[in-house]
Each structure stands twice: as C-alpha cells, then as structure tokens.
Image: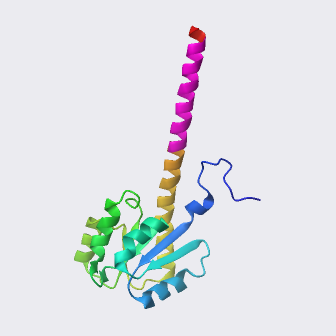
Amino acid sequence: MSAASPHPDEPTSAEYKVRVLLVDDQLIIVEAVRRMLASHPDIEYHYVTDPHAALAGAQALRPTVILQDLVMPGVDGFDLIQEYRADPALREVPVIVLTTKDEPKLKAHGFAVGANDYLVKLPDQLELVARIRHHSSGYIKGLKCEACQAKLAGVQAELAQVKAELAALRGA
C-alpha cells in the first residue's frame, strides 16, 4: 500500500512527522539527546552545533519543534528565538529552551521573547519525549488546519467559477 496522499495537493504523512532540531554547541548534549530519542522511531532527530547556522538549518529542515540552548559561543540563544519568530516560515514552530540555567528571570525572559517551554539540562527522557510530542502535535495540527483551509479556499474558488459559468449560460 502506498503512503502517498489520495489527492496530489495534500501533504503526505512524512510532512507531518515529528522533526526535532537541537541547537547546541556541546557534542555531549547532542549525543545525550540523540540517545534519549533513539528508541522513538517516529521522532526524526537533527542537530546544529554552529549557532550561526541555526536559522538556515531550521529553514531547510522545517522542524516541528526546536530545542534551543541559550549559552553558545558568539550567539545568544534568546536572539535566535527572536530570529525564529521574525521568520514567517518558522514563526509558529514551537521552541523549547534547553539550558543549564534554572533562573526564574531567564525563564520569564525566554517566554517573553517567544519560547514555548523551558527545560533544564538534561531532563528526564520521559519528560523530554512528552514535551516534544506535545508541542509537535499542536504544531502539526496547525499545519493540517492551514492545509485544509487552503484546500477549502480552492474549492470555493472553483465553485464560484462554476456558478458564474452557470449564470452566464442561463443568461444566454
């Protein structure tokens, strides 16, 4: 059986796969998160260790959630969150701050600049997976809703065209 959509303009299930992008310069964290997610084949895991490549990586990957470190060489994680929010393609992608900093002021600032969640490194595997699934699920539902709205708009335009043609035929 084919995994293709019944209609060519509908997104495939692969487009709705849970896709995680970790932005962290520490390879030990990259590996730890990889191991936490390895037993979950429905979660696609990607990472960027160069924070200067984070925005381009996110644009290319189209993740359903971004795990964002705050402290990286030459780049402030809060600034990256603001860059994601300024980008129309990434504006709605959930961002989970993943940092060693457990300070209420930093958490509040993270939410103020657009983070959706905040976890202290390294969280429990069950909690990390649950939060990734929760945020990705909401984001994917939004994508599906947008796709349905676009399809509905197309059908409505076709209907309007048919009505106009029918009215023209009646008037002739």
Residue furthest to the left: 105
User: In this orientation, which residue lies closer to the viewer: 24 or 144?
Assistant: 24
Magenta stretch contains residue 52 = no
Q: Quadrant of residue 13?
A: bottom right
Q: Quadrant of residue 57?
A: bottom left
- Image side of residue 39 versus residue 55, left or right: right
- Image side of residue 40 versus residue 20, left or right: right
Position of 116 relative to 68 (above/below): above
Residue furthest to the right: 1
Magenta region: 150-169
Q: Is residue 64 visible?
A: no
The residue drawn where x is 62% and y is 75% is: 41
- Quadrant containing the N terminus is bottom right
Residue furthest to the bottom: 28
Residue 162 percent coordinates (x, y): 58, 24
Magenta span dominant secondary structure:
helix
Position of 66 relative to 172 (above/below): below
The residue drawn where x is 60% and y is 13% is: 169
